[in-house]
Image (cartoon, helix red, strand yellow):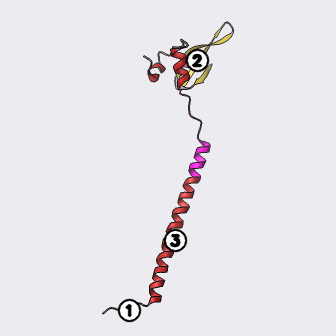
Amino acid sequence: MSEKVSRLDRLRSVREWLVWQLRRTDDTIAELERQEVVTARAARTLPSPAFGYRLAMRRAGGRPAPDSVHTDDCGMAGKNTKPLGRDQALRAITEDGVTACPYCRPDTGLGVL
């Protein structure tokens, strides 16, 4: 035997389902907003991109002059260095005649062999 469900009971069931669905939607929206805040905060606090290369300077006649190109993590560069981007390091080795460090071999990473 099938019992007839009143129209009012059916509408209450639909309303309960809609309330549940609305809560799920609100929770999803709140989670996405939290993720956006975290992403925006991370974008503001991330360090600037590393240069990747350094130009070691030496004293020549009382003035600093380029000595050699090193990778950013090379310990042979010394203290008197200048950060270089990839293009700057490539230009220094190929056009300016600055030597590449024989230990960290930045020329290999730059494709200069």
Question: Disc 2 to disc 1, how far (Cα)?
Answer: 88 Å
Which secondary structure lies at badge 2? strand
Kindly identify the residue that appears in the image at 58 percent across and 46 percent down: 42
For this orientation, the residue located farthest to the top is: 61
Label 3 crowd (10 A; few <14 / some 14-19 / many >=20): few
Which amino acid lies under the numbered mark 2 shown in the image of this protein? Ala
Q: Is residue 63 left or right of residue 96?
A: right
Kindly identify the residue that appears in the image at 54 percent across and 62 percent down: 29
- Foreground disc of the pair 2, 1: 1
Which secondary structure lies at badge 1? loop
Is residue 104 among the parts visible in the rendering? no
Q: Which mark is residue 56?
A: 2
Q: Between residues 108 and 75, which one lies in front from this camera angle?
A: 108
Is residue 6 among the parts visible in the rendering? yes
Which amino acid lies under the numbered mark 1 shown in the image of this protein? Lys
Q: Which residue is mark 1?
A: 4
Q: Which residue is mark 3?
A: 22
Q: Which residues are magenta?
A: 37-52
